[in-house]
Amino acid sequence: MPSILTNLELETDSNVSYPSIDDFLAKLDKAEPRRGWIEKFLRPLTSLGVRTLDDIEVISPECLTVFHRICPLMVMDFYVHIISYLDEAGHLAHQSSRL
């Protein structure tokens, strides 16, 4: 049976200062309070060594589902938020470096 989880290649920029995973999850919780982002993701991510958002590239979406039993749809939604943030942060860093 095919899985919705895919291996993602996340690109980070060494010139960007990324938020802590606590701050990122708190921002998601504030925007979507019923999703329980902190409750579902903080402990699994910190146990895997994720401290800042750019550390997320060391783990796979499947790891969160298989080892921490987080719903695959929730994991992929989480990664959509991460990719969106990384794209925006990289775009802003690129603009500010041209100034």
Image (spheres, grey):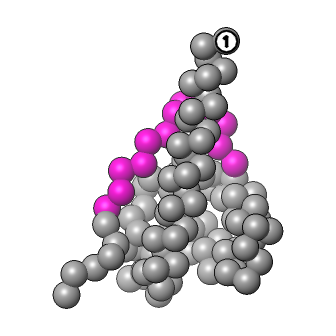
- The front one of 40 and 98 is 98
- The answer to whether residue 16 is magenta is yes
Which segment did they paint magenta? 7-19
Q: Quadrant of the C terminus?
A: top right
Residue sitting farthest toward the top: 99
Q: Position of residue 48 (x, y in %)?
A: 51, 66
For the residue labelled by badge 1, is the local secondary structure a helix, a strand or a loop? Answer: loop
Q: Position of residue 90 (x, y in %)?
A: 56, 35
- The front one of 92 and 64 is 92
The residue that appears at 52% across and 70% down in the rendered structure is 77
Main SS of residues in magenta: loop
User: Label 1 belongs to which residue?
Assistant: 99
Residue 39 in sight in this render: no
Residue sitting farthest toward the left: 1
The residue that appears at 49% across and 40% down in the rendered structure is 12
Residue 16 lies, with reference to residue 38, above or below; the image says above
Q: Quadrant of residue 34?
A: bottom right
